[in-house]
Image (spheres, helix red, strand yellow):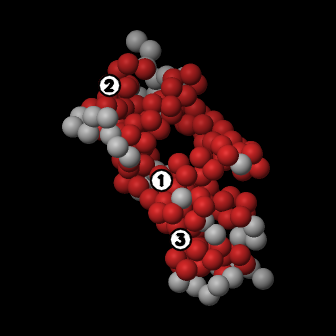
Amino acid sequence: MAKNEARRGALADAGIAVLAREGSRGLTHRAVDDEAGVPTGTASNYFRSREALIAGLFQRIGERLAPTPDDLARRAAQTPSPALFADYLRDIVRRLLGEREVTLALFELRLEAARRPELAAGLEEWQRAAFEGDVAFNTAAGLPGGRAEIALFHYAIEGLVFDRLTSSIDPGTPTDEVVDALVAGLLPRA
């Protein structure tokens, strides 16, 4: 029997909400069912194990954090430059901060994978694919910076987002200014 993809997405969204609110210990099939307002057993019907549920959450997180085709098309029409690169990064940070619940859930999953090696492989695969996609996108778009710089931006942006979602060390500095400073400091000089 084919599963309802809309329900699968709604269950994953409920799992993201539970994870963001309760942490990884609160993420159970029953908690997802309760959050989604569906009969007990529904989440386990769509995600047979905790590992399958977590894999489904990774997939849904990627979907919810992805840029829209319109955003990509608008920027693709612009001339590649450090300013355009900074615009892409500001958009990434806005999406991560705008989807607070999703980003907190992602951080929770990363922490759980650090404690549970059986989850680490799936997370690493997901992260590597995303990173390789970012490198390929940057290259195809003719944007400045290569593989090493993209890695540095991942490290910096993840730290910035974590700072802004938790207790910020400098909440008075606008986030866009921080991104612009990172671009100025991390991109190779032309």
Query: Which of these two is toward me, 96 or 133?
Result: 96
Rendered image quadrant of residue 167: top left
Circle 3/circle 2 CB separation < 8 Å: no
SS label for mark 1: helix
The residue at 41%/56% (across/down) is 99
Question: Which residue was labeled with disc 2?
Answer: 181
Label 3 – label 2 distance at C-alpha:
36 Å
Quarter of the rendering occupied by the C terminus: top left
Query: As drawn, is 172 to the left or to the right of 53?
Result: left
Q: Disc 1 marks which residue?
A: 104
Distance from label 1 to label 2 (Cα)?
24 Å
Mark 2 Cα within 10 Å, few/some/many (few <14, many 20+)?
few
Q: Is residue 182 above or below residue 100?
A: above
Q: Residue furthest top?
A: 190
Q: Residue at x 37, y 26 (%)?
A: 182
* Front in this rendered view, residue 60 or 158: 158
What residue type is disc 3 on? Answer: Ala
Front residue (pair 139, 87): 87
Q: Which mark is residue 133?
A: none
Secondary structure state at the residue bearing disc 3: helix
Q: Which residue is mark 3?
A: 14
Say which amino acid is labelled 1.
Answer: Leu
- The residue furthest bottom is 39
Q: Calculate the distance from the C-alpha at mark 1 to the C-alpha at mark 3.
A: 14 Å
Q: Is residue 118 left or right of residue 161?
A: right
Residue 58 position, x and y percent, is 61, 55
Neighbor class of circle 1 (other Cα within 10 Å; few <14, some 14-19, many 20+) is: many
In the image, 180: left or right of 64?
left
Comes first in the chain, label 1 or label 3: 3
Camera sees residue 109: yes
